[in-house]
């Protein structure tokens, strides 16, 4: 004898199972989708390069960037968050990482673009280490899925050297 309540709970269990199954499949396809991201950056202009009154170096850059993150999008991708960081070594820290720009890519159609930007955030060193400094411009991205775990990855967009003198 099957009561209504019994059938109802069978239905719940089955749909719960299907939900778990489809979430696992979604995460699995993300694991097997190894994206090939292309990205490039170059410095168009050093707008200002100076030592602040407190002794910290400050530089403002205009960058020309192009990136193609279309391969990070699957049917399970909600959005992709990207940020560009200036990364460099100083005697005090083996990694200094300063975010210069960030952006949310809402869909695959907007995942390939070229842009010329003055950095959104100031590039300020904790000290005066920036003259002649070699800097890596690194693209970091976070693929945020509809279900499953966020996947983080990164690539070096370019290696630049800052000028030897302030402007
Ligand atoms: C920006 O870079 C692209 C190549 O990635 C190049 O085709 C374009 O001319 C550059 N734009 C400027 C303003 O330098």
Image (tube, grey):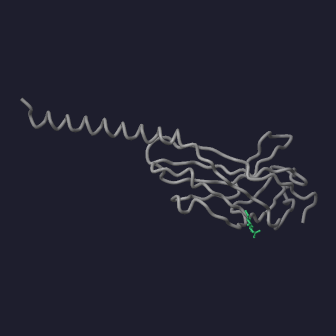
- Of the 4 image quadrants, the one containing the N terminus is top left
Residue 33 screen position, x and y as percent: 54, 43
Ligand 1 lies in which image quarter? bottom right
Task: Say whether residue 132 is left or right of residue 47.
Answer: right
Q: Which residue lies furthest to the left in this view?
A: 1
- The residue that appears at 86% across and 53% down in the rendered structure is 130
The residue closer to the viewer here, 101 or 36, is 36
Query: In the rendered image of this protein, does residue 114 appear above or below residue 134?
Result: below
Residue 4 screen position, x and y as percent: 10, 37
Residue 145 screen position, x and y as percent: 48, 47
Q: Residue furthest right?
A: 165
- The residue that appears at 61% across and 61% down in the rendered structure is 112
- The residue that appears at 44% across and 48% down in the rendered structure is 146
- The residue that appears at 90% across and 59% down in the rendered structure is 163
- Identify the image quadrant of residue 25: top left
The residue closer to the viewer here, 55 or 69, is 69
- Of the 4 image quadrants, the one containing the C terminus is bottom right
């Amino acid at each position: 004898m099957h009561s209504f309540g019994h059938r109802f709970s069978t239905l719940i269990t089955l749909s719960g199972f299907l939900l778990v199954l489809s979430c696992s499949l979604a995460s699995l396809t993300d694991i097997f989708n190894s994206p090939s991201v292309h990205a490039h950056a170059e410095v168009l202009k050093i707008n200002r390069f100076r030592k602040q009154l407190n002794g910290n170096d400050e530089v403002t850059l205009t960058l020309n960037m192009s990136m193609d993150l279309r391969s990070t999008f699957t049917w399970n991708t909600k959005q992709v968050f990207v940020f560009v960081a200036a990364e460099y070594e100083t005697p005090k820290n083996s990694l200094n990482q300063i975010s210069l720009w960030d952006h949310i890519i809402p869909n695959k159609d907007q995942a390939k673009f070229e842009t010329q930007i003055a950095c959104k955030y100031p590039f300020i060193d904790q000290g005066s280490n920036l003259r002649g400094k070699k800097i890596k411009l690194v693209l970091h991205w976070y693929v945020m899925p509809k279900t499953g775990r966020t996947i983080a990855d990164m690539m070096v967009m370019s290696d630049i050297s800052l000028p030897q003198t302030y402007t």
